[in-house]
Image (cartoon, rainbow, N blue to C red):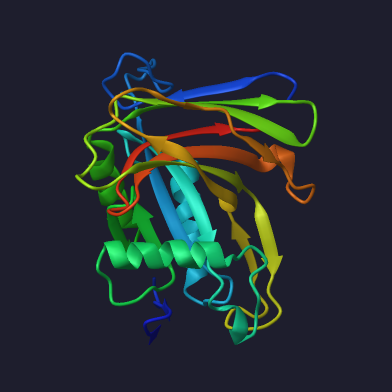
């Protein structure tokens, strides 16, 4: 096991407008309503995985994230995955093609907010509140269930195909839970891609073929929400020709800047 103030790898561990409205359970409007089986509405929960193709313990966590996305095993929650590949493993033999220094910096922000001694991979953070080793599926399910029961803002997300490589998003946030004094509720927009694969030639995972879901391709702030009035924005994102359109999704989440607490989430596929 490698652990330092910088990093650690823990062993074991369309032409039509597409619309989605993902709102806290118990509110009048939801996308997951009671069906024939009587299943209750699900609350969207953001599950972030900090990972690296250079870390031998990360593939098991990548599989956990994929399973959570596919099976949606928590009855009251809609798991919204976000895979963020850090870059601090890149000098150890394999440069992760999906890594970014921005994701490493975001993870360091969590380390500060959650009072951790260091950053590490694989790490899961649920709704900005609970962190643990990314391969711990049982811990993930418990944290997701708890997060789904907490108060959430109403977040609406619509994605429009402009007929080019640019997508326009209409975002609305209302009924925001109380923000901690001195903090601010930042609205973030991410573009994710599923089904990415790599044949790793060097480093700790040499010879392995790795698969990833919900890989963050773009992550940006689009404004600040407040409890005084609804938040509305219409940002645009230019989609890279390297991204496969059929595998893309958009995710919007509202997060306190200092505490990192996530107050609401919405997602929509872009295919």
Q: Residue 34: horizontal and vertical position, in percent?
A: 35, 17
Name which residue lies at 23% across and 44% down.
146
Residue 247 appears left or right of 39: right
Name which residue lies at 27% across and 71% down.
116
Q: Residue 64: horizontal and vertical position, in percent?
A: 45, 57
Res. 113 image quadrant: bottom left
For residue 204, above or below residue 181: below
Q: How many marks?
A: 0
Q: Nearer the viewer, residue 199 or 97?
A: 97
Residue 206 at least partly seen: yes
Q: Residue 227: horizontal and vertical position, in percent?
A: 28, 29
Name which residue lies at 65% across and 75% down.
95
For residue 220, above or below residue 251: below
- Give the quarter of the figure containing the C terminus: top right
Res. 1 image quadrant: bottom left
Residue 248 appears left or right of 178: right
Q: Nearer the viewer, residue 229 or 207?
A: 229
Residue 72 at least partly seen: no
For residue 79, above or below residue 33: below
Name which residue lies at 72% across and 42% down.
239
Q: Residue 176: horizontal and vertical position, in percent?
A: 29, 30
Q: Nearer the viewer, residue 88 or 33?
A: 88
């Amino acid at each position: 096991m490698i652990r330092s103030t910088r990093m650690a790898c823990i062993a074991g561990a369309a032409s039509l407008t597409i619309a989605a409205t993902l709102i806290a359970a118990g509110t009048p409007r939801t996308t997951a309503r009671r069906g024939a089986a009587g299943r209750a509405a699900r609350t969207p929960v953001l599950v972030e995985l900090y990972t690296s193709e250079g870390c031998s313990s990360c593939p098991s966590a990548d599989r956990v994230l994929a399973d959570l996305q596919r099976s949606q095993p928590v009855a009251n929650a809609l798991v919204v995955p976000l895979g963020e590949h850090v870059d601090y493993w890149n000098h150890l033999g394999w440069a992760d093609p999906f890594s970014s220094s921005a994701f490493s910096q975001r993870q360091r922000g969590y380390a500060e907010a959650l009072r951790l001694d260091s950053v590490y991979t694989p790490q899961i953070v649920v709704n900005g509140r609970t962190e643990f080793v990314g391969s711990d599926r049982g811990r993930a399910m418990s944290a997701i269930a708890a997060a789904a029961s907490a108060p959430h803002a109403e977040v609406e997300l619509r994605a429009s195909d402009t007929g080019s490589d640019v997508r326009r998003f209409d975002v609305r946030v209302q009924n925001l839970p109380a923000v901690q004094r001195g903090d601010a509720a930042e609205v973030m927009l991410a573009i994710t891609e599923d089904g990415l694969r790599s044949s790793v030639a060097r480093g700790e995972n040499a010879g392995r073929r790795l698969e990833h879901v919900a890989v963050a391709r773009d992550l940006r702030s689009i404004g600040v929400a407040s409890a005084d009035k609804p938040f509305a924005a219409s940002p645009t994102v230019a989609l890279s020709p390297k991204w496969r359109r059929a595998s893309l999704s958009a995710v919007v989440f509202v997060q306190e800047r200092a505490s990192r607490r996530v107050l609401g989430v919405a997602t929509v596929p872009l295919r």
